[in-house]
Image (cartoon, helix red, strand yellow):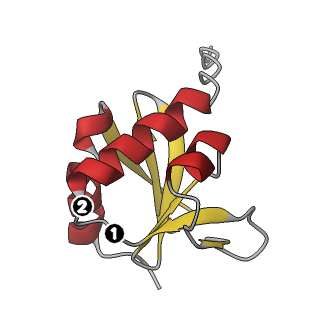
Amino acid sequence: MASNEELVQYIADQCSGAGEIKTRKMFGEYGIYCDGKIFGLICDNQLFIKITEAGKTMLPTLETASPYEGAKPHFVFSDIDNMGVLSRFVQVTCSELPVPKPKKKKG
């Protein structure tokens, strides 16, 4: 089931304290980025955030699941209404993620 676009925008707005948040349609669902780093997916109206050591330290009891069949497990972040905690969690997660490689120009 595809995620609701209004919910995707709400989640992006709730993460906005972490940096520049963008979403992008992929696989019929959405990837979510902070300052150019993909940190999670929104699938079936749920927010999945990549697992990092910093994330485990900040919220050690978060449930994990795969956003789709065959995917690596991610944190399932269900408290999307708590903007402060969500933004901070996105910040600590992204602090451990690598900077994306520059895209090669076509042509």
Query: Could you tell me residue 27's position as x and y percent?
Result: 57, 64
Query: Could you tell me residue 70's position as x and y percent?
Result: 79, 71
Mark linked to residue 64 = none
Where disc 2 sits, the SS reads loop
Query: Could you tell me residue 102's position as x and y percent?
Result: 60, 16
Outermost residue toward the right? 70
Q: Where is the C terminus found, in terms of image quarters? A: top right
- The residue drawn where x is 24% and y is 49% is 84
Query: Could you tell me residue 78's position as x and y percent?
Result: 40, 72
Give the answer, above or below, for where 95 lies relative to 44: above
Q: Amino acid at mark 2?
A: Asn
Give the answer, above or below, for where 39 lies relative to 95: below
Neighbour tally class for label 2: few under 14, some 14-19, many 20 plus, Cα within 10 Å:
few
- The residue drawn where x is 61% and y is 20% is 103
Q: Amino acid at mark 1?
A: Asp
* Residue closer to the observer: 15 or 92: 92
Neighbour tally class for label 1: few under 14, some 14-19, many 20 plus, Cα within 10 Å:
few
Judge left or right: residue 95 versus residue 97.
Answer: left
Where disc 1 sits, the SS reads loop
Mark linked to residue 79 = 1
- The residue drawn where x is 51% and y is 59% is 41
Q: CA distance from mark 1 to mark 2?
A: 6 Å
Contact (CB < 8 A) between labels 1 and 2?
A: yes
Judge left or right: residue 47 versus residue 85.
Answer: right
Give the answer, above or below, for where 26 lies relative to 103: below
Outermost residue toward the bottom? 1
Name the residue carrying label 2. 82
